[in-house]
Image (spheres, rainbow, N blue to C red):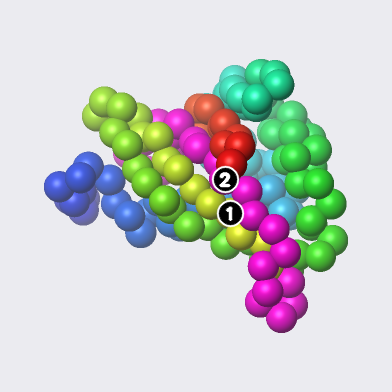
Amino acid sequence: MATLPTDGYDREALQTFLVDYRLALGSGDLEALDDRFAFPALLIEPEASTLLPDPEAVLSAAHRLDGGRAEESVATVPEVLAVEHVGWALLWVDVRWTSVDENASAVGSDHVRYLLRRGREAFEICVVTTVVE
């Protein structure tokens, strides 16, 4: 078993988790989404909070929040802005998702915070909150 860095989480594993999560969203892979969430999860937006009971609800919320960028975008790249420890097993992860087109030009970005539970093998999303800038 690999040892964790002194800050308590493996940066490469976190980056891989985020990339795999976004690929699961983009492909509509319900099984992969099920593996990445601690259901029920919570989506918090400025105007409302929504319980996410299953992978289908996650996909529905993601499509609603996308705002049509999926048609222009060929990739969405995560940039981890900050990680805050909330106890030994929980992390608040601040991520900027940048959508890029076929010319690698940014076509939009979203700022999202995730409350992740850290397990033996992976992370699980407990809370998703949009950040309004």
In the image, residue 58 sits, relative to residue 11, either above or below, namely: above
Q: Categorize mark 1 by other alpha carbons within 10 Å: few (<14), some (14-19), many (20+).
A: some
Residue at 37% of width from left, 54% of height from top? 13
Q: Is residue 59 something that shows in the picture?
A: no
Q: Is residue 22 left or right of residue 90?
A: right
Residue at 72% of width from left, 54% of height from top? 26
In the image, residue 22 sits, relative to residue 107, either above or below, namely: above
Q: Is residue 63 left or right of residue 117?
A: right
Residue at 84% of width from left, 52% of height from top? 68
Q: Nearer the viewer, residue 71 or 32?
A: 71
In the image, residue 126 sits, relative to residue 99, either above or below, namely: above
Name the residue tied to disc 1.
97
Locate residue 37: give its quadrant: top right
Locate residue 33: give its quadrant: top right
- Tell whether position 106 is magenta: yes
Name the residue tied to disc 2.
111
Circles 1 and 2: CB atoms closer than 8 Å: yes
Mark-to-mark CA distance, 1 and 2: 6 Å
Q: Is residue 64 left or right of residue 48?
A: right
Q: Say what amino acid the circle numbered 2 marks.
A: His
Q: Say what amino acid the circle numbered 1 marks.
A: Trp
* Secondary structure at numbered mark 2: strand
Q: Position of residue 34 (x, y in %)?
A: 61, 36
Instruction: Please provide the residue range marked out in magenta.
Output: 101-124
Q: Categorize mark 2 by other alpha carbons within 10 Å: few (<14), some (14-19), many (20+).
A: some
Residue at 45% of width from left, 31% of height from top? 115
Q: Is residue 104 something that shows in the picture?
A: yes
